[in-house]
Image (cartoon, coloured by chain):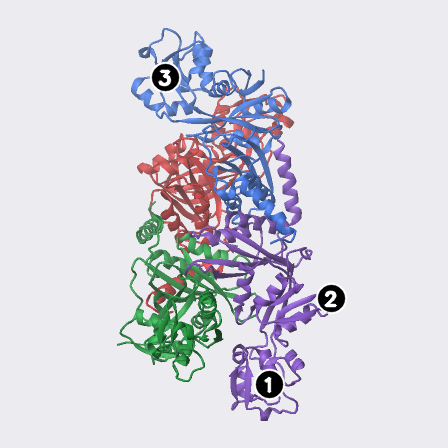
Chain colours: A blue, B red, C green, D purple
Amino acid sequence: MPRLAYLGPEGTFTEEALRLMEPGAERLPCATVGAALNAVRSGEADGAVVPLENSLEGGITTTLDEFAWGEPLLITAELLLPVRFSLLARPDTELVHIKRVYSHPAAITQCRGFVNRELPDAVVVSAPSTAAAAQEVSLPGSPYDAAIAARIAGEHYGLVEIAANIGDRTDTMTRFVRVSRPGALPEPTGSDRTTLVVFLADDHPGALLEMLTEFSVRGVNLTRIESRPTGDGIGRYFFHFDFEGHVADARVGEAISGLHRICGEVRFLGSYPRADGVSPQIKPATTDEAFAEATDWLAHIRQGNS
Amino acid sequence: MPRLAYLGPEGTFTEEALRLMEPGAERLPCATVGAALNAVRSGEADGAVVPLENSLEGGITTTLDEFAWGEPLLITAELLLPVRFSLLARPDTELVHIKRVYSHPAAITQCRGFVNRELPDAVVVSAPSTAAAAQEVSLPGSPYDAAIAARIAGEHYGLVEIAANIGDRTDTMTRFVRVSRPGALPEPTGSDRTTLVVFLADDHPGALLEMLTEFSVRGVNLTRIESRPTGDGIGRYFFHFDFEGHVADARVGEAISGLHRICGEVRFLGSYPRADGVSPQIKPATTDEAFAEATDWLAHIRQGNS
Amino acid sequence: MPRLAYLGPEGTFTEEALRLMEPGAERLPCATVGAALNAVRSGEADGAVVPLENSLEGGITTTLDEFAWGEPLLITAELLLPVRFSLLARPDTELVHIKRVYSHPAAITQCRGFVNRELPDAVVVSAPSTAAAAQEVSLPGSPYDAAIAARIAGEHYGLVEIAANIGDRTDTMTRFVRVSRPGALPEPTGSDRTTLVVFLADDHPGALLEMLTEFSVRGVNLTRIESRPTGDGIGRYFFHFDFEGHVADARVGEAISGLHRICGEVRFLGSYPRADGVSPQIKPATTDEAFAEATDWLAHIRQGNS
Amino acid sequence: MPRLAYLGPEGTFTEEALRLMEPGAERLPCATVGAALNAVRSGEADGAVVPLENSLEGGITTTLDEFAWGEPLLITAELLLPVRFSLLARPDTELVHIKRVYSHPAAITQCRGFVNRELPDAVVVSAPSTAAAAQEVSLPGSPYDAAIAARIAGEHYGLVEIAANIGDRTDTMTRFVRVSRPGALPEPTGSDRTTLVVFLADDHPGALLEMLTEFSVRGVNLTRIESRPTGDGIGRYFFHFDFEGHVADARVGEAISGLHRICGEVRFLGSYPRADGVSPQIKPATTDEAFAEATDWLAHIRQGNS
């Protein structure tokens, strides 16, 4: 039974993601993303589940920077989790009794419509996390009547769900990844994603265009690009790339070898099955067969054939 | 005397930036970036100063998203402000007396070396902002002995500077921008920057490469690219671009007209003098003169000359 | 009635092209392509019809070089003429009597199958042109029994057509163009072609790629590219480009203005209706409407709107 | 002693090239380029020397098309030969006696200045080749007083050189290549050239740009591009490419493998030392070492390292 660290406390959306990804795992809640990843690095955990990006908030910068700068880890799986907020209260609370609501600011923002409509007179107070809000509300003498949090938090802290799915948007998603220490990669499935961090050798005009051309020439489609500061002053960035395909694919291998040649440093963060199950349209010229055939042809002509 | 809103409370780095950019302005502190920008939109303020990016933390996503989605505003100036943290305390406090330190988590992180070295036994507690930490420390009965904040916060709240420049890195910078309601643009200076927000028409493979090619073909160099989620699910992004030059420059005008043609929406956020004073190397083929000459030539041949 | 020079003598395929293009014109046969074009330059003729390329032989280098180096002229029309060879002889000649055949070497090559099959014992002799061969055969005392030439040559010189369409390939075509002195251009028809000659400013690596990018970024498709030596040593070339669209089209105008900026010299050779009547697929982003809309938008934001 | 076919008759510039390239070879003059190449294909000759391009006339289309369509051969060497015309006459002829000059039309064109200046009253007549002109003039009863030809033709046919280097331009060059049957390639020298023929898979817009991008992405610089008709109608072309580097170079191998994948057919015509001795500037990212290092890195990360 693997032991997986995650961004705690108990009752977070990250725990929910972890339980969906690895139902049987032992769970180790950690205070921060960095702590969860360090638990993997140190061997205390076999892996970790951390959020990578959210469809409203964008990239989780702590995660992005940990992947770029910390001791290397490998992403081995991803999950897209719908973000569904519940209004949670102590048993026997009714909606009309709720005067003080406690939650994380992002959750408060995303549930503004529900609160204005159903709890127009309630005072809403910021909490450090949605799970912490639920935990607080579960205490008998809590000054708060309800928390906005994941349903799973209610289960943890003995709260009842007064209302479900109360977010203003119903399509908000968070993308979580499972990471391990470097080791065997997941097998290619035909619907894979690869993630890299790339540092420029020198920040000349056109450097980004050159990087994208390395991908496009081999028919590799980007699915995400994110710039992050290197820390060395405004105007100096490095890049996170997600793209279609597995590092075992010939076209991916050649593309990232090209990046490796032209860039200062390329850090491979893993190839893993896509959560959305989408398979890329691979052009005939960039299939593994086409690459193998071209390799044979090149060997043939290097022998002096034509 | 213009009235400028800013991200308050008094004593923030944003206030420091505002005072450097417009020493004589009346200052209107606001609780959030959104509130400061809304004060401009409503006419309550003539302009606002807000942070756009930090060399350690990256883009300030609230600002980026406000610029993209809110009622349009124009950036008219930028400032690069070194982030210098001071250890501030009530008068007569000495370093050896400091047992409890209060500050914003980012500041705590960035001053970890100083605290470990000089205050190894101090308890460090998180505050909502550095300015709020200074304000709290200034209260006679405060449980905290010192705040880590901008020097300007000490001046506001009557604290003395026990130690200056205590950040682990001395080169951290924040980039601030001054915004106004749409209106006359700053004149080109030869050292200008332009900022755009770009939404894709359809998110086909290669769309980003096409956008970058619109710039490169006209010799316009990007200085920043940042992707942000559109909110419509993981995998859907829009882009912030900063690049060299002024919208009045012919090469910039043609490049962004090209973007406008191929993209879903291009929002112009302003052309303004660069804070670093760097002038781009403009290739002879992309000067205003070269464009004017080509326009004349085209008119000439369209008349049937050759 | 216009007076048109052409590559003579009477009875050439060029004359056939001229008669199809301008049935009512007065015809002025000239000894060389250069002489025909000079007749236009001097005012002796109102225009000229000359061959530009052949689907088997390739570009007619004399024409290409005359267009590049000579006093400027404009192409105003093009024609694709199927090259159909006839076996022509004096009246009363029968196939079995033909022992000596006279024709231009290219025609001999292209009719090799017919000659081997039908005239296996005939001697075949090279002539300076197919029309000259027909003229020679028409003389009563000619040592030749038949000529391979255009049917029109038979009509001119009183020969009968023993066999028609005797080429090995039935799809050989020559492309002819009609040229005039610089003046009003043909109106755009929606199915137009434009021809340019481009000299590089400096022959740096990637120069050709940059030129093609100027076209592709504006959605302009090339239909022909031909390199020719500048004369200044091996390895120095200039280029002929044919591409879809009319110089009056916005996308064409911007593309060739871009070429004009980055190249040493761009010579406009004309915009004229395509002989094949094909209309290009214009992407929505590169229609005249899209360009006009982008121009309006640029003017709008340059006023400080966003 | 190898036996080399060449474009005859004796006394051509091609013979001069052959003697410079392989002084000790047995020489087999042939009537046409095709015949010379067929002599190699059949084994009658060990190799052949043929002209490929001329700095005034451009590509020698017969050679280009033979290389593209005929049984494959390999280019193993090249030579740049200055084209120096001599005025050749029978012994005891003086300049003032020359009334009738015989030569190939291209030579006549290129020596027009000399003839007009020194032989203003001479009649100039066209010959099938410069060597044939010299041969004719050498006959005692010849109606011609002098030939314009290569000096070597004078040596062959017993003529004296009345004037040397009489071309209007002194920098005209012809590029000759030595070809062999497929077999071992010349070793890379660091100053090599590679020649390919490329047929498109389908003639879509942008196909040429894609081909050039395959080169540019691997830092391979083109030195010549020439389009030739496929024969299947106007508007259908294939391409000859010359570029820097040897097929044994990693960057060249990857570039042409890319071409092979995206094109209909790529025919390798050889890698051989450059006649001009120029060594390309290879960017650090595209050296063999950089490719080898990237290959190692890829193998490493495919094992799950990062």
Does label 1 lie on the same chain as label 2? yes
Q: Earlier in the sequence, mark 2 or mark 1?
A: 2
Label 2 Cα crowd, 10 Å radius (few <14 / some 14-19 / many 20+): few
The one of D225 and B181 positioned closer to us in this rendering: D225
Label 1 Cα crowd, 10 Å radius (few <14 / some 14-19 / many 20+): many
Where, by quadrant of the figure, is residue A231 drawn? top right
Q: Give the structural element (helix, strand or loop) at label 3.
A: loop
Where, by quadrant of the figure, is residue B95 drawn? top right
Q: Which residue is mark 3?
A: A164
Q: Amino acid at mark 2?
A: Met
Which of the two discs, 3 and 2, sits closer to the camera? 2
Residue D137's disc is 1
- State the separation of the CA atoms marked 1 and 3: 106 Å
Is residue C4 shown left or right of residue B63?
left
- State the separation of the CA atoms marked 3 and 2: 93 Å
Quarter of the figure that contains the C terminus of chain B: bottom left
Subunit under mark 3:
A
Is residue D292 shown left or right of residue D231?
right
Instruction: Provide residue C277's location: percent of width, then percent of height.
Output: 32, 58
Where, by quadrant of the figure, is residue B268 drawn? top left
Q: Give the structural element (helix, strand or loop) at label 1.
A: helix
Instruction: Provide residue D205's location: percent of width, then percent of height.
Output: 42, 52
Q: Amino acid at mark 3?
A: Ala
Residue D1's disc is 2
Does label 2 lie on the same chain as label 3? no
Instruction: Provide residue B127's location: percent of width, then percent of height.
Output: 49, 24
Subunit under mark 2:
D
